Amino acid sequence: MRILGIECSAGPASVAITQDGKVLGSSFINVKLTHSQTLMPMVEQVLKNCMLTLSDIDYIAVAAGPGSFTGVRIGISAVKGIAAPLNIPCVAVSTLSAMAYKHTDRNCIVCTAMDARCNQVYNALFEVKDGNIIRLCDDRALLCEELAKEIEQINNTENKPIIITGDGAEIFYPFVKNSTKLSPEHLRYQNAVGVCLAAEQQISNQEFVCANELLPVYLRLPQAERELKKKTEGT
């Protein structure tokens, strides 16, 4: 089973291809160019380097949110455009879940965090046990202080290291630096390899859709819509 994974939910963009859990090829870029400029050339290059075409791909997986509204939309639109002509099934992967798959080498608690602005992080918690990922809560947006209290409770009851990872890790880590570890930088950012690995589990559970049914997952409205709603409610 070959999976093409795409990740552009935040600043970095990445593309990967896996086959039955093995990484065949990947590309990661973290520069100031927009994802609309970098994503499709990366897809083409990774396919070329793996000596594959889209006809060789069984599923396409994408980080469907939470994350940057623009980034998530670009990723979803790209996957729809790639998958629809060949009727390739699509997998919408939680951005937060995909990040946990970079830490399967040890038993631990992984706290994935993305910058949600306004002293908040998009967050989810996962237990890693013998290489398996166990979700402990739904994806949510929390104030850093709220999440810190939850981490403190976990630290008091679990005899496992707690690792903070994601592009929001540096923002949140100061709140819990005495009881957790910050993921090393080379493992910290969202990556399409994690998207592919998370998608494998979802595929085994029959959690995939056709291109037309693929949708982004937002934990809150875009800022423009929030501002409009605020103005409307105030009139």
Image (cartoon, rainbow, N blue to C red):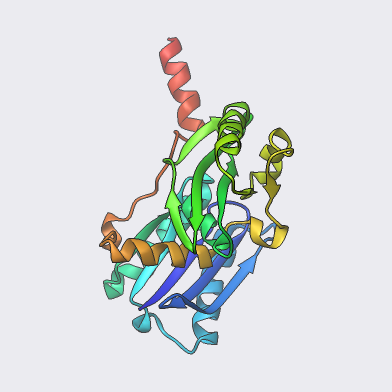
Which image quarter holds the N terminus? bottom left
Residue 158 in percent (x, y) is at: 55, 42
Q: Is residue 87 left or right of residue 192?
A: left
Q: Is residue 94 left or right of residue 173?
A: left
> Looking at the image, which residue is at 34% across and 61% down?
202
> Looking at the image, which residue is at 65% across and 65% down?
29
> Looking at the image, which residue is at 68% across and 43% down?
180
Residue 186 visible (yes or no)? yes
Residue 35 in percent (x, y) is at: 57, 59
In this view of the protein, which residue sits in the foreground, 126 or 68?
126
In this view of the protein, which residue sits in the foreground, 215 or 110?
110
Task: Using the rendered view, name the quadrant where residue 143 is placed.
Answer: top right
Total number of numbered labels? 0
Residue 156 in percent (x, y) is at: 60, 34
Residue 207 in percent (x, y) is at: 28, 59
Q: Is residue 91 left or right of residue 13?
A: left
Position of residue 4 relative to residue 155, above or below, is below
In this view of the protein, which residue sits in the foreground, 63 or 174?
174
Which image quarter holds the C terminus? top left
